[in-house]
Image (spheres, rainbow, N blue to C red):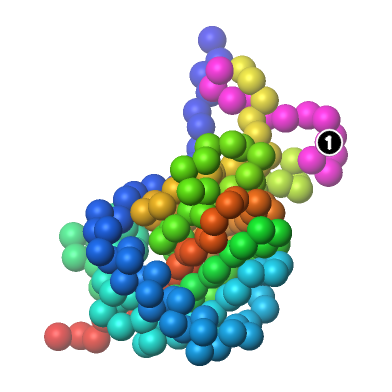
Amino acid sequence: MAKTRRLFATPFVVDELASAEGLQALRAIITAQQADDSAGVQISNINGWHSNTRMVEWGGEVARALAYKAMQMADAQTVDIRSPQASRFGWIPEMWANVSSKGSANQYHTHPGSYWSAVAYVDDGYEGDDDPALGGELQLLDPRMPMIRMTAPDLRIADAGGAAEPNEIAIRPKTGMIVLFPSWLHHAVRPFSGPGTRISVAMNLVPALNAPE
């Protein structure tokens, strides 16, 4: 009888930020930075405000604490194969803030040059409304696509239960959620129509060899 193994899974890690005070402090710092630099930058964002990528500097201790949380998550998911018990690598974080109102979205993109990427949601902007029509989901694209669709677009690989595997996964953010995924994974944000303002912090983690002791 044929046996099927599921190989090369893509990790997607979800955790929670426990400190309400920390979320409030992040909100205050991001709001102040937006007031100071209202133009921001344009990268993958459609509408909305995207800060520069130096939030580790201007975000103070609360931003560094958030970066440390993401680095802990990355450490738990990463093995140095030449030194499995004590990794020789640390992480250089790059961090920025996003503020999104109605109509804001992010195009599909990846983060070349980094190993892990993370997003922390300071405020999901839904204000307690669970209507799926509000959008704003984090979209994750099957990294094997479009290769598996170029030959036969109507075919899908069967999952463990025999159903068609999805090409995209939608993750609905919530306040206090932090997610971690490989930087090569294509991701986007659907147009957001929530009644509030979405505030999130994104990070890239670049591996770097620690200095020898």
Q: In this rendering, does residue 194 appear at all?
A: yes
Magenta residues, start to end: 149-161
Q: Main secondary structure of the magenta part?
A: loop
Please report the residue visible at 70 percent of the width from the left and 59 percent of the height from the top.
Answer: 103
135 to 24, vertically: above or below: above
Please name whichever residue, 176 or 166, is drawn nearer the observer in this view of the structure.
Answer: 176
Q: Is residue 2 left or right of residue 191?
A: left
Q: Which residue is mark 1?
A: 153
Is 73 placed left or right of 9 in the picture? Answer: left
Q: Kindly identify the residue that appears in the image at 60 percent across and 51 percent down.
A: 194
How many residues crowd mark 1 within 10 Å: few (<14), some (14–19), many (20+)? few
The picture places residue 51, in percent across and down from the top left corner, at: 54, 80
Helix, strand or loop at disc 1? loop
Above or below: residue 126 compared with residue 99 = above
In the rendered image, residue 50, in percent from the top left (x then y), is placed at 58, 75
The kind of residue on which mark 1 rests is: Pro
Instruction: Residue 83: give x, y in percent of width and height.
Output: 24, 65
Assign the N terminus to one quadrant of the image: top right
Snapshot quadrant of residue 160: top right
* Displayed quadrant of residue 108: bottom right
| Horizontal relation, residue 12 to residue 155: left or right | left
- The residue that appears at 40% across and 70% down in the rendered structure is 27
Q: Residue at x 38, y 87 (%)?
A: 58
